[in-house]
Image (cartoon, rainbow, N blue to C red):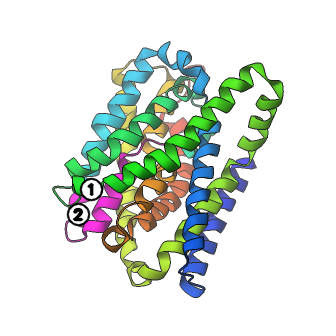
Amino acid sequence: MRSSLSTAWILLAIAIGLGLGMFLPWESTLLEVVTWVALGAMVFAVVLGLPLLSLGKAIAKPRVLVALFAVNLLVVPAVAFILSRVLWQHPALQVGLLLVLLAPGVALSLTTVKQAGGDVESVLGAKPILLVGQLVVVPLFAVGLSGGVLGFDDLPDTFCAILGVIVLPASIAVIVQLVGVRQASWAGARQTLTRYTVVFIAVAVALSLWVRVPAHIDDLFELLRLVPLFFSFLVLLAPLGLLAGILASLTPSEKRAIMIVGAGRGGVIMLPIVMALDPEMWGVVPLVVVMHLVIEILGMMVYRTIVPEIVPLENR
């Protein structure tokens, strides 16, 4: 029920953002500032919900870590590169596809792991590591795999966004978690805020769309080119994630987790980064991120059904 409600919140936010951008455009510095504040608040809420103090549990399962990093650092970049070649005549779409597919999943995939009977604990502790890697490696990966479409001269603003809208809110979230170990009131406040993470995400997505859609109404139909590519990614990552789990000799529940987490991407956390790119050249990229979010929501609904069928538990 809670998962369905979260999905509804995000889809409603996308519809509202598109509607505002198309029918009530507002070019305003105030809207830009509010959007960046909302993005920072979203990052704070997402990081606050991550088990930053459970890193030891992840290290205690090195085979899961190896499989997880193999999928995210070897398999996914290879698949993303191949799919991006289809868009060689559409540089902005190509860059958007690379940025969103290279980013490891954070929130949605974990919910799906739990629903599919996967070992949530085995991948939960690795999420902070993946998040840090995402901030540093993904933009550099995208430059390398884009074939010169995206250059290093496009990145300074993104690193400013990483520092101001990601690192600062994330650092505050870490402090809250650390203090929460000793202060029950802080721990309670954290639990309350994490219940509304989806609201923070929804507001940030809606505002980002309101800012960017007006200048790219003519490009909205072009985004449909991405639909088969994003679905292809989901189809390919299921067997490839399973193969990684088999090679790492994981248990069935751990294999389920690797399959789902490998297919889940972290487009939500990428929003501040892509919003910081030059809007004249890359203004459509945030729309690519949102398009992927819609496809991923649909894909995760399918994953939570088929993954348990593909990988039955030992006691069945």
Q: Quadrant of residue 29?
A: bottom right
In the rendered view of the protein, which quadrant contains the C terminus?
top right
Residue lying at the far bottom of the rendered structure = 23
- Indicate whether 151 appears above or below 291: above
Q: Residue at x 52, y 73 (%)?
A: 211
Magenta segment, prevailing SS (helix, strand or loop) = helix
Mark carried by residue 83? 1
- Say left or right for 298 vs 104: right
**Res. 302 in view:** yes
Q: Residue at x 41, y 51 (%)?
A: 160
* Amino acid at pointer 2: Val
* Amino acid at pointer 1: Leu
> For the magenta stretch, what is the residue range?
83-106
- Indicate whether 269 appears above or below 19: above
x then y, percent, for residue 69: 37, 29
Find numbered disc 1 in the image and state the secondary structure of the residue it sits on: helix
Q: Is-magenta flag for residue 179?
A: no
Within 10 angstroms of label 1, few (less than 14), some, or many (20 or more) residues? many
Q: Residue at x 42, y 79 (%)?
A: 216
Mark carried by residue 86? 2
